[in-house]
Image: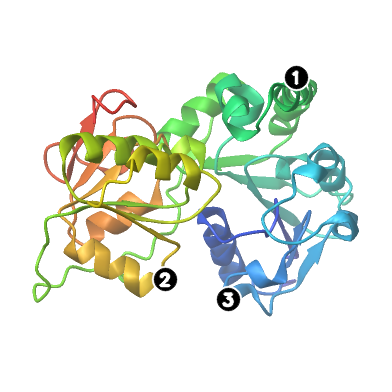
């Protein structure tokens, strides 16, 4: 029997997050498949992908390295549409912006694992949060308007469509007019286990990247007003807003990025995880629950699939300091 020839398409390798963990599993399923991406920072690859056949697009010549790729945004749809995937039998995409634009010349079926349709394309509030300044926001508004029809058409060409949560499935229906199968993403729950020998301490934990939509500053402001200890683990461009919300409160400790052993130790010692953002899925709450930590979350998004209200966590109804 002839071995199936597979191509994997990922948006970009500029940092390690949940979508890269999904690509790791694709690579595990199809270890000989080439992995195509618009741009690749070799230093940002997960260890399991460092020796994989990863092929950047022609945009790589314009990429400056690191997490910043905003200057390439207008070129990404065309770059992914023109990827040379070779003569393959199947294409699998890891999509959150433009990966579904691929056009395999072989006419091969395209199966998409969609982390989410690009929220900044469809939600004006996301564009306001993602780029600073009125002129930049207006430019992003214009670009988003030019891409929505193409985004929907690309979805209509897919042979199969899977998403990570029922929340994202509803977006797919509303924005793309398509139906999707929910397949939760991989989370290494074996690594995050409770330890009866470690005592809980009187502090709350907020963990994850510091970006606007995660609303970490709401958690910090709530802790400040409530007069409780909060440890913030994670770094990112929203650090100034988080520091401002802390208002110099000595009970709020901002650690920056932490390694996995430190994060596990925090899970095992904290009273609860505070999770005020609206996530497509939300890996951090799953890790926390695996480590025996209850979750205090904004009651929208992927946490509705993973947190059992009244048993493994509680929800607050608004993304406000008062509600949290």
Q: Residues within 10 Å of mark 2 (few under 14, many from 20)?
A: few
Q: Determine whether label 1 and label 3 are within 8 Å by CB.
A: no
Alpha-carbon distance for marks 2 and 3?
17 Å
Q: Determine whether label 1 and label 2 are within 8 Å by CB.
A: no
Compare residues 162 and 191 and report the one nearer the observer. 191
Is residue 33 shown left or right of residue 114? right
Q: Which mark is residue 48?
A: 3
Regarding mark 3 in the picture, which secondary structure is present there?
helix
Regarding mark 2 in the picture, which secondary structure is present there?
loop
Residue 33 in sight here: no
**Nearer-N-terminus badge (1/2):** 1
Q: Residues within 10 Å of mark 1 (few under 14, many from 20)?
A: few
Q: Residue at coordinates 56% horizontally, 37% vertically from top-left?
A: 116
Compared to 52, does 273 lie above or below? above
Compare residues 7 and 20 and report the one nearer the observer. 20
Compared to 188, does 211 lie above or below? above
Compare residues 251 and 172 and report the one nearer the observer. 251
- Judging by the rendered image, the residue that carries numbered circle 2 is 259
Q: Quadrant of residue 233?
A: bottom left
């Amino acid at each position: 029997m002839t071995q199936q020839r597979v191509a994997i398409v990922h948006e970009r390798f500029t940092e390690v997050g949940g979508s890269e963990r999904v690509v790791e599993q694709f690579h595990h399923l199809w270890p000989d498949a080439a992995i195509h991406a618009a741009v690749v920072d070799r230093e940002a690859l997960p260890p399991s992908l460092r020796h994989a056949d990863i092929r950047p697009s022609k945009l790589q010549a314009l990429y400056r390295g690191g997490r910043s790729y905003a200057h390439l945004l207008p070129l990404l749809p065309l770059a992914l549409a023109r990827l040379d995937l070779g003569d393959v039998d199947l294409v699998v995409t890891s999509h959150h912006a433009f990966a579904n634009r691929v056009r395999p010349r072989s006419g091969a079926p395209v199966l998409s694992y969609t982390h989410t349709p690009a929220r900044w394309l469809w939600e004006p509030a996301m564009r306001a949060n993602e780029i600073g300044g009125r002129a930049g926001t207006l430019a992003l508004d214009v670009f988003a308007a030019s891409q929505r029809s193409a985004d929907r058409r690309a979805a209509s060409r897919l042979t199969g469509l899977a998403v990570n949560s029922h929340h994202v499935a509803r977006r797919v229906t509303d924005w793309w007019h398509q139906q999707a199968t929910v397949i939760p993403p991989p989370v290494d729950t074996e690594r995050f286990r409770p330890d009866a020998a470690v005592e809980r301490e009187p502090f709350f934990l907020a963990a994850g990247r510091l970006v606007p939509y995660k609303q970490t500053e709401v958690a910090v402001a709530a802790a400040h007003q409530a007069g409780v200890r909060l440890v913030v683990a994670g770094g990112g461009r929203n650090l100034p807003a988080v520091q401002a919300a802390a208002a110099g409160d000595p009970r709020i400790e901002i650690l920056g990025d932490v390694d996995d052993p430190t994060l596990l130790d925090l899970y095992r010692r904290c009273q609860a995880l505070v999770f005020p953002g609206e996530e497509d899925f939300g890996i951090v709450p799953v890790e926390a629950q695996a480590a025996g930590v209850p979750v205090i979350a904004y009651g929208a998004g992927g946490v509705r699939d993973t947190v059992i209200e009244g048993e493994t966590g509680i929800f607050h109804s608004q993304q406000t300091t008062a509600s949290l």
